[in-house]
Image (cartoon, rainbow, N blue to C red):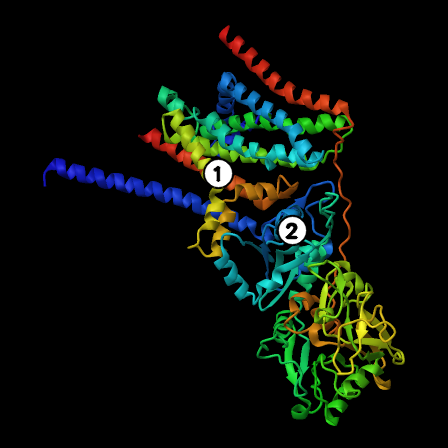
Amino acid sequence: MGLSERAAGVGRFTRLGLGLQVALLVLLALGVAVLTIAVFDRGSLRWRRDLTVDRANSLDPQTLELLRGLPGPVTVDLFFRPAGRAAGSVVARAQSLAEDFFADAGESAPDRLVVHSHDLVGDLARVEARLDELRLDSSTLYGNTPYGQILSAVAVSRGERRTVFRLIPDACEVDWGDPYSREEPRILQWRGEEVFAEALGQVASDQAPKVVFSIGQGELSGRASDPQGYALTRLRAELAAEGFEVDEWSPVRDGPVPADADVLAVVGASDPFQDSGRLALEDFLARGGRLLVALPMKAPEGESELERLLLRYGMRLVRGLVCAPVVDPRSGLLQDGRPECAELRIPGKDTSSSHPITRPLWERNRDLLVSFSRSFERGATPEGGTVLDLISSPADAWRDLPGPDGLPDFRFEAGREDQGRVRLAMACEFPASTDLKQVKGRVVGLPTPSFLDDRLFDYNRDFAINCFDWLADRDFRVRVAAKDLFESKLDLARDPGLARTLTALGYLPPLGALLVGGLLFVLRRRG
Amino acid sequence: MSPGDQPAGAAGFLGLNGLSAIYRRELQSLFLQPLAWILLALGLWLNGRLFPIYLQSFGGELRSALGALLGQGTLFWALMAILPPLLTMRMVAEEARSGVLEFLLTAPVSDGAVVLGKLFASMTFFALLWLSAPLYGAVLALSGAPVDFPQLLLAYLGALLLSGLFSAIGLFASALTATPTLSAFLAFVLSLAFLVAPGLIQQQAWLDPEWARELALKVDVIGRYSRSFLSGVFDSGHVVFFLAWTGVFLFLAVRRLEMQRWA
């Protein structure tokens, strides 16, 4: 090898070595920056203070306490999609409020809250994978509005537990305006913090109340989904996701109701209970047990033992399907005589505003759907107990009595049938047997299983979950104090002086800069 | 007291001998050029023209309109990507070309002081530019308008930190080349890359979403600025973020100067 060749080789290696050193230096500098940022992003080393006059970026102390007391990190998944033109602006505003709120929440408790915002337009595969992880059906994410369904939901999860709320109507109270008078929809109230705090309570709680579903008396199945949806698959999956332990109880096989059962549910039992089963139910209630009874759709001959049981707790079942006139799509007129009359849409305002089960539905005007339901009347209130109506039918409903052929004709017959509101769900709280007076038993009575079955579960999910929460004594509601909002509005139209001030502010500073710059330039030229 | 004025002992201890002198010199060369005043007047004029429009579009909401001047509006970010490269393009590149840099590097001042002095001079320019928002707030407050001053001043402070970061990028680019135009272009591309990086990172399907999110958070200039300074929240984590990235680009610029010293 010649001298010049050796020198060229050395030069190449030197350059390569220098290049590597520079690359290493750059990488090291980037690494140090990223590491420093990561270290100072940690909650323990971070100091955050909201300096706004109205503490606009601060969470309520109760929410903060909940967040900081979480046993582990909670994940918040935002599933937001833009809405169509009519509801678009109000949905966009709600989404922006939620994004701001969760950004603040994430900043306030960086080690406790992880927020994911999902792209529901461009990255559906990733969204579907996440929904599978969360065991969420996409239909759960939709909220109903007068302009159709909108997809704006928030899933809050910790480990196996998760709960979902919709921005509209759960987190926002909306005035939908009037398209005829061109009145735009607008958000009346943002309740996101309250709803989020409730959700946190649900996923953070380590309690796992046990719900036992009775089987063996023709109840709705909880395992394989019935092709027509007459099953409890979705309810049971949702209860498990909401932190309940779900089990089954067969009176014939298991004898008494398990001692560790917090809630017993008897849904759509079309066959009679044997004496041992009936006694087990009575004993369970006497001990202050919590029972949910949804009577079967098809009325058995005579009075069933479940009807007699409910009567003891102030709920008397009345014969006749509850029907209401429906709007004929062609004429736009109200009509009866069609099976659709037995499918009732119950506005949230027709639910009780005072009971914990229905108060959230009433506040958010959440519609419920119910089909082929009978109804209750008030019976005698048990001693020391209280009985409350939960849901009423629309005012133009009637109890459709069977015709001579024993079948309903869905037609209102004045004189033979009464028209008016009837009770579609009731709840009773009563003291347990004499030696356990301090223990309160609870019963929720539903005249139809359609409140709980898979077919209408998208509409009735919250009502169903609320029933079990109340029965199991789970209450996660948090009252968030209202903030004094800082008003910094200027009335541009009414203040002509303001317009002059703004014009002056627009021109004086740049003119001043030009003058000073020009003066300095001239002075410099003159030496 | 100017940003570069420190007790000689402290500056010496930090290895920043001559910082004050460099700062004064840079300030003079910056403000004795017509370019700085033209850019300043242009920036102030744009802010002045847009402020009433922002006010109108927010329905008279003063807090949002002032926020738009300091970060919620697109103009702010456009100015942030364009002005620092224009202002810093000559600071090292021109001096290297004209031979002044060689003279400076042989003077008894440290490389760190040279770079930091230039950075402080650039930040002084931006301090004047962004002053328009607190000025509007003060004038409107005098006429009885309700102004959230803590939030406004925090946003101003954040804008200064942000200007420091983009000026550091400009200084690094200026140290890389002897051609000012190329330096401005490089700085503009780097600044733009910094602004769009979080979005780009999160769109990468091959990255684990959790990793992508964490990585994006480490370079999320707009998000961090909006969630803290602009919202009126002082957050030490975000302050460290801006200081750390500014430090990285200053460090690289200093190393580049050192290489030139030994070249």
Could you give the CA–CA distance between mark 2 and mark 1, rounded to whole angstroms?
A: 34 Å
Please, which residue is most extreme toward the left here? A2
What residue do we see at 33% from left, 42% from top? Answer: A21
Residue A256 spot, x, y in % from top left: 71, 90
Considering depth in this image, is A489 or B249 the residue closer to the camera? A489
A498 up-or-down from A30: above or below: above
State the quadrant of the N terminus of chain B: top right
Amino acid type at mark 1 = Gly
Residue A19 spot, x, y in % from top left: 30, 40
Residue receiving disc 2? A98
- Name which quarter of the figure residue A78 lies in: bottom right
Give the letter of the chain under mark 1.
B
In terms of secondary structure, where does tag 1 sit?
A: helix
Please, which residue is most extreme toward the bottom here? A275
CB atoms at circles 2 and 1 under 8 Å apart? no
Circle 1 residues within 10 Å: few <14, some 14–19, many ≥20: some
State the quadrant of the C terminus of chain B: top left
Amino acid type at mark 2 = Ala
What residue do we see at 65% from left, 69% from top? Answer: A457
B120 up-or-down from A345: above or below: above
Q: Is residue A380 left or right of residue B260?
A: right
Q: Are marks 2 and 1 on the same chain?
A: no
In terms of secondary structure, where does tag 2 sit?
A: helix
User: Is residue A426 shown to the viewer in this render?
Assistant: no
- Name which quarter of the figure residue A237 lies in: bottom right
User: Is residue A4 shown to the viewer in this render?
Assistant: yes
Give the letter of the chain under mark 2.
A
Residue receiving disc 1? B247
What residue do we see at 81% from left, 80% from top? Answer: A317
Q: Is residue A300 left or right of residue A312?
A: left
